[in-house]
Image (spheres, rainbow, N blue to C red):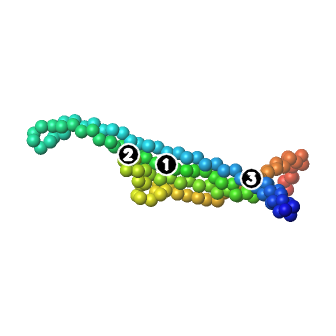
Amino acid sequence: MKVRLWKAAGLLLVTSGAWAQTSVTMYGRIDGGIEYLNHIANGTGGSASRWSAEGGDWGTSMWGLKGNEDLGAGLSAVFDLETAIQIMNGTTGGGRLWSRKGSMRPAISRARSIRARPASSAAPKASC
């Protein structure tokens, strides 16, 4: 029992130093509305009116996820996933998930220092 407890404590100490920072943003836009049409010719010489639901008049309805995942050692994965949505029937654009945008790339963020050299008091002499 003591051996298992020590192994668990050792594993906890080894893994406690690995903290990853994750940033995920969910975004989107829904374009839906109601349309009213009047004075529609009806074939008998009269006119009618109609109410209907619509989507996509002012832009594509869409939603997406973007963010980054810290992989440690100065490495991170950056992603941007976006899909179109048909709000009238709930399907995705083109029947595919991430139909508008789907990208993932690695990123390296290492701190670098830049040292400025002090200006020397003795300027180089020009030779003729």
Residue bearing the label numbered 3: 19
Label 1 crowd (10 A; few <14 / some 14-19 / many >=20)? some
**Which one is nearer the viewer's eye here, 92 or 100?**
92
Question: Do the CB atoms of the residues marked 1 and 3 lie less than 8 Å apart?
Answer: no
* 108 w.r.t. 42: above or below: below
Q: Along the horizontal axis of the image, is 64 left or right of 73?
A: left
Identify which residue is drawn at 15% across, 37% down.
Answer: 47
The circle on residue 63 is 1
Q: Quadrant of the C terminus?
A: bottom right
In the image, which is nearer the foreground, mark 1 or mark 3?
Answer: 3
Residue bearing the label numbered 2: 56
Q: Tag 3 or tag 1, which sits nearer the N-term?
A: 3
The amino acid at mark 2 is Gly
The amino acid at mark 1 is Trp
Residue farthest toward the left in the current orientation of the protein: 44
Identify which residue is drawn at 32% across, 42% down.
Answer: 53
Label 3 crowd (10 A; few <14 / some 14-19 / many >=20)? few
* Residue 111 shows up from this direction: yes
**Which one is nearer the viewer's eye here, 30 or 16?**
16
SS type, badge 2: loop
